[in-house]
């Protein structure tokens, strides 16, 4: 009986926290959607006395870009800088500028030109603007992007997945507000390196976890980040639109499952009674080891990905992979979600710009943080996971795409294997 007391105490504290967050939304560090983020950012910028740094992969000449520039131009007496990836000089509104649309769509041309005007307006107002990672002649360096999304206002950091364009603003996404001078200084130093054209790749500690500044396939640093997943004991919950290798391979190891052939996966998926649960969880309410080598319990692994995905091959590949039985797949029905985060054992939250995909590993510069602050983790569970699971469908063998080995899966698999050989 007394063994339940710590559990009941923890549940009581969590319910009190939920009530507090509902009644005090301004104290929630999880900012869902562009409007919530921009309102909070505007308040922090108005209070800033030292620096306002903004870093994004996408900056476009629409209402989102205009709002950002107006906010920065209004903030006087502080150092203001924007660091934009050269992607925004090549692609606008998910369309290559050098495409037939430039010739036939005057609104598209106006948006491209307005983006350049906003940059000039910023510079005239004293805002420093720099572009990183030039795509180069014939776009030969186009894949190598700086994918970071970051805002720093004095000692307040916003980190997550929101870019500055109307279509990004319309997506389901989040930024996390972290008030920490050590973290702010670490990321400000990295920002200034990127702003001046320098690349960074290192791991640093801050008061609530670690900071990972990733630069393409630096194996040791990526392995260190992925070790958080490998060390899971109870559960792993991942939210991302584009999960692929290398994380899927790590999750398969976490589930204690050797690689399974596509034919075997499809055969087992067709067997009745599996109810969509991973093989090691079928027939049991507990997560138990299914082989003697696993050394005990195995974590429950869940992935939430949007049902409506702007890059549908990733969703199709996950539909194929989930039939192998090493994770549960949930399709979020609230439209396109660009949110990316992972919660491990309800104790470590990993968030930042990476989608946990092959593009991050092979091509992109990313910023990721681990967070062990219970306030942030509780807020993430309340404002992100609970609503997303409530509005998501667990994929089962009854789903028409269950286990399907589509052309997209073949392309993604072949491309990833080729990259592993090259790099």
Image: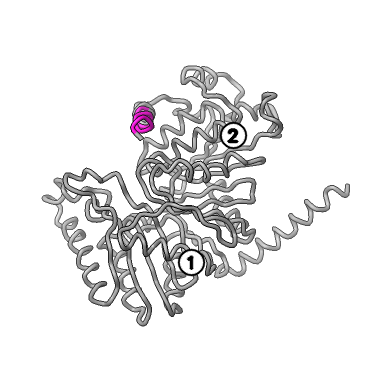
Give percent across and percent down for residue 422.
33, 32
What stretch of residues is rendered in magenta? 414-422
Direction from residue 255 to residue 152 in the image, left or right: left
User: As displayed, is residue 236 above or below residue 252?
Assistant: below
Give percent across and percent down for residue 361.
41, 42
Q: What type of secondary structure mainly makes up the magenta span?
A: helix
Direction from residue 164 to residue 292 in the image, left or right: right
Question: Which residue is under mark 2?
Answer: 254
Q: Nearer the viewer, residue 247 or 300?
A: 247
Label drawn at residue 184 = 1
Q: Secondary structure at mark 1?
A: helix
Q: Residue furthest left?
A: 103
Tag 2: Cα neighbours inside 10 Å, few (<14), some, or many (≥20)?
Answer: many
Q: Quadrant of the C terminus?
A: top left
Q: Nearer the viewer, mark 2 or mark 1?
A: 1
Question: At x 69% / y 34%, what residue is drawn?
Answer: 297
Q: Nearer the viewer, residue 371 or 121?
A: 371
């Amino acid at each position: 009986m007394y063994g339940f007391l710590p559990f009941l105490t923890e549940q009581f504290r969590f319910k009190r926290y939920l009530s507090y967050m509902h009644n005090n939304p301004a104290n929630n560090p999880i900012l869902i959607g562009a409007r919530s983020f921009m309102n909070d950012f505007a308040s922090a910028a108005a209070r800033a006395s030292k620096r306002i740094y903004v870093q994004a992969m996408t900056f476009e000449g629409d209402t989102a870009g205009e709002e950002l520039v107006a906010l920065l131009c209004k903030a006087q007496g502080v150092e203001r800088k924007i660091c934009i990836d050269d992607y925004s000089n090549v692609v606008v509104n998910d369309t290559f500028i050098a495409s037939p649309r430039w010739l036939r769509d005057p609104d598209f041309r106006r948006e491209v030109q307005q983006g350049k005007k906003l940059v000039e307006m910023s510079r005239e107002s004293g805002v420093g603007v720099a572009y990183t990672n030039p795509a180069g002649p014939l776009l030969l360096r186009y894949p190598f992007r700086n994918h970071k999304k970051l805002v720093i206002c004095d000692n307040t950091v916003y980190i997550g997945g929101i870019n500055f364009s109307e279509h990004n603003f319309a997506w389901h996404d989040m930024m996390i507000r972290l008030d920490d001078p050590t973290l702010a200084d670490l990321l400000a130093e990295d920002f200034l390196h990127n702003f001046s054209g320098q690349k960074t790749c290192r791991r640093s500690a801050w008061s609530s976890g670690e900071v990972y500044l990733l630069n393409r396939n630096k194996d040791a640093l990526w392995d260190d980040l992925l070790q958080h997943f490998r060390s899971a004991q109870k559960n792993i919950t991942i939210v991302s639109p584009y999960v692929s290798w290398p994380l899927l391979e790590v999750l398969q190891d976490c589930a204690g499952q050797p690689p399974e052939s596509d034919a075997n996966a499809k055969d087992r998926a067709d067997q009745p009674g599996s109810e969509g649960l991973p093989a090691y969880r079928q027939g049991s309410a507990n997560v138990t080891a299914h082989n003697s080598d696993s050394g005990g319990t195995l974590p429950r692994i869940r992935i939430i990905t949007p049902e409506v995905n702007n890059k549908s091959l990733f969703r199709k590949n996950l539909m194929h992979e989930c039939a192998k039985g090493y994770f549960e797949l949930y399709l979020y029905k609230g439209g396109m979600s660009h949110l990316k985060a992972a919660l491990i054992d309800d104790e470590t939250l990993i968030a930042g710009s990476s989608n946990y995909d092959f593009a991050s590993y092979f091509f992109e510069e990313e910023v990721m943080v681990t967070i062990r602050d219970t306030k942030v983790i509780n807020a993430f569970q309340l404002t992100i996971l609970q609503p997303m699971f409530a509005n998501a469908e667990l994929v089962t063998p009854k789903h028409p795409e269950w286990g399907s080995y589509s052309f997209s899966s073949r392309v993604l698999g072949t491309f990833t294997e080729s990259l592993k050989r090259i790099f």
